[in-house]
Amino acid sequence: MIIRPFFLLICVLGGFASLFSQDFSAESVSPNGVYLEGYLLRHDFNNGFLSLNYERNFGERKGIAARIGIYPDFESLIAVPVTVSKLTAPLKAHHFEFGIGAVYRVEYFEERFFHDIPALMIPLMYRFQKEKGFFVRAGINLWVSFPTLPAPSLSAGYKF
């Protein structure tokens, strides 16, 4: 069953994150970030395991973030996840991230391009980030499609 390994992974990551658990408070957070996200399960609409993402934080305290990514299967399909997320306590090092978005898919099949929106996406993540520099995310991307899949993922990136 997939729940046990995922629970173990969250526990290990939680222990790793506690190494950085010093209190942190910044005046502002860098607005831009890039990160690589690895999905631990394949979805019904893509055979890939990695996406490359750009995010931009908005607002005075930078608590709202918009993300766009590229999620190829390196054969004939490219998916583009687009989400808007809320970051709790964005001026602290540890916080919860939740949001909503959609996946836009372009597929080349029988010498034609097809496109659609195969899934809605609800990210539920733990995030460790400082004012700028390296950050990590771990949690579940809930892919609302047929079937609905709670897909665990890990991310590492850089804020600038």
Image: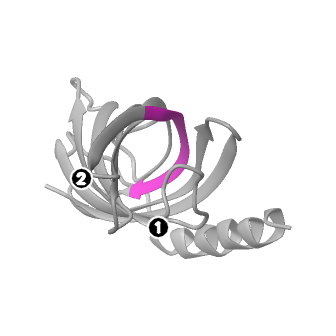
Q: Give the quarter of the image for residue 124.
A: top right
Residue pictured at 51% horizontal, 36% vertical: 121
Rounded to the nearest angstrom, the CA distance separating label 1 from label 2 is: 29 Å
- Note whether 55 is above or below 9 in the view shown: above
Residue pictured at 49% horizontal, 63% vertical: 47
Q: Residue 53 placed where, x, y %?
A: 28, 53
Tell me the quadrant of the picture where the C terminus can be found: bottom left
Magenta-highlighted residues: 117-128
Is 127 covered by the magenta stretch?
yes
Q: Residue 132 placed where, x, y %?
A: 20, 57
Q: Which residue is mark 1?
A: 49
The label number, if any, that marks residue 97 in the structure image: none
- Crowdedness near tag 1: few (<14), some (14–19) or many (≥20) residues, C-alpha within 10 Å: some
Tell me the quadrant of the picture where the N terminus can be found: bottom right
Q: Is residue 134 left or right of residue 127?
A: left
- Note whether 98 is above or below 154 in the view shown: above
Camera-side residue: 84 or 1?
1
Name the residue at the right extreme. 1
Most prominent secondary structure in the magenta stretch? strand
Q: Which residue is mark 2?
A: 131
Q: Residue 19 placed where, x, y %?
A: 51, 75
Callout 2, which amino acid? Glu
Task: Say which of marks 1 and 2 sits in front.
Answer: 1
